[in-house]
Image: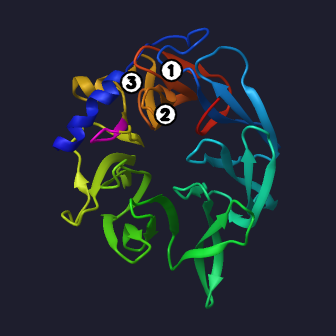
Amino acid sequence: MALIVAGLPIVAGIAGAQEGPAPEGPLAGAPPNLVAVLAAHSRDFDTVVAQSLAEGGEPREVARIAHLPDHAVRGAVSPDGRLLALNVPNGGSPSRPRGSLQILDLATGAETALGEGLDALGTPLWRPDGLAVIARLNAAFEGAAAVELVEFPVTGAPGGLRARFTDVLGAYPVAFDPEGRLLVVLIDARGSTLVREDGVEWELSAGVTRDWELSPTGSTLAFIEDSTVEGGRRFQARLKALDGSVTAAAEVSLSGQQLGVAWRAGSPAPTFGFEPGAAGASAQASSRRDGFDVPLAFSPDGAVLAVEAWTGQSFADHDEVRLAFVTASGRRVIAGPVRFLGWSAR
């Protein structure tokens, strides 16, 4: 319990910041060179934009990425903030889409194709050195359905198989540990299991999990347990120590439900989003009068938190969801159907 309590003041200081309309001009407290990389959605294409949070004005358009009707790109910014890896659903059919892996240079808009046949719902994962991207493909192996995790070098060299899993409902690459070993969450008949590519496993839950985030030190995985209960679904924050001292997912004693995970650099504990009405002053600080924030990611220096700003009174009973950026002294809400892809700099 001490681990999560230590993190709650982050929620109070960041997600509970200024309410009301987005401020005009600079976002108070944002670093002057910080840029958020966004995807503005349209029916047949998404527009990648670079939004400086320290200056007002229109975002800079980087590229327009065509995709199948009513689908959307998924992406992640490279560790150095220069490149964007995109999974573009532009193959197959609208009912059975397939993605292509593309690298977008955020400075020039130049695009490089790396691979095809991706699971269209997968988000690319960057290798920590920024020299390659892990992508998820659905395949067949020895007559059985399989999920393959393929590593694609950004140089355009052929991809290489990093891991293969059969008889699973899903396999999700989530992070690399401090030694550079790939960590994958498997969801199968056992429930949810964290697997390191050398075969070490940690049980996370007997059911489904989501929103996985590895701590900056690589010692703890934070995630949300998504369970079915009478009357609907229940979302609960969980922690898992990876040092071998814990054999089951740690119980996190928080009131109400939680959704979303973001881990601030240097913090011993993550930030979770809370429904309005959660018990405790720190938990209440993550809600607003008109709704609540679901955390997505802290900026590299921890000064800004990207969130989904929900209106409504619960995860099940909500209305509008907007992208927003929050500091200790202000917030800016982004209008329209926009997704956050990562952080860069100008």
Residue at figure coordinates x 67%, y 32% from the top left: 337
Q: Picture coordinates of residue 15 (x, y %)?
A: 40, 25
Task: Find residue 229 and report its horizontal and vertical position in percent.
Answer: 35, 52
- Give the residue at mark 3: 14
Amino acid residing under circle 3: Ile
Q: Nearer the viewer, mark 3 or mark 2?
A: 2
Q: In the image as oriented, which residue stretches furthest toward the bottom?
A: 142
Front residue of this view, candidates 28 and 19:
28
Tag 2: amino acid: Ser
**Residue 188 in the figure: left or right of residue 258:** right
Residue at image coords 27%, 35%:
7
Q: Is residue 321 above or below residue 25?
A: below
Closer to the eye: label 1 or 3 = 1
Question: Which residue carries the number 1 mark?
Answer: 30
Are the residues at dot 3 and dot 2 in contact (C-beta closer than 8 Å)? no
The span picked out in magenta is 266-272
Marks 2 & 1, CB-CB < 8 Å contact: yes
Q: Amino acid at mark 1?
A: Ala
Q: Nearer the viewer, residue 233 or 20?
A: 20
Residue at 80% across, 61% down:
91
Number of residues whose C-alpha sits closer than 10 Å to that of mark 1, classed few (under 14), some (14–19) or many (20 or more): many
Q: Earlier in the sequence, mark 1 or mark 3?
A: 3
Q: Out of 166 and 102, give the one closest to the viewer.
A: 102
Name the residue carrying label 2: 299
Q: Quadrant of residue 240?
A: bottom left
Up/down of 103 relative to 185, above or below: above
The spot of residue 79 in percent (x, y) is 55, 47
Q: Is residue 128 left or right of residue 141?
A: left
- Using the image as rendered, state which of residue 154 and residue 44 is in the foreground: 154
Q: CA distance from mark 2 to mark 1?
A: 9 Å
Residue visible at 41% across and 74% down in the picture: 189
Within 10 Å of disc 2 (Cα), the crowding (few <14, some 14-19, many 20+) is many
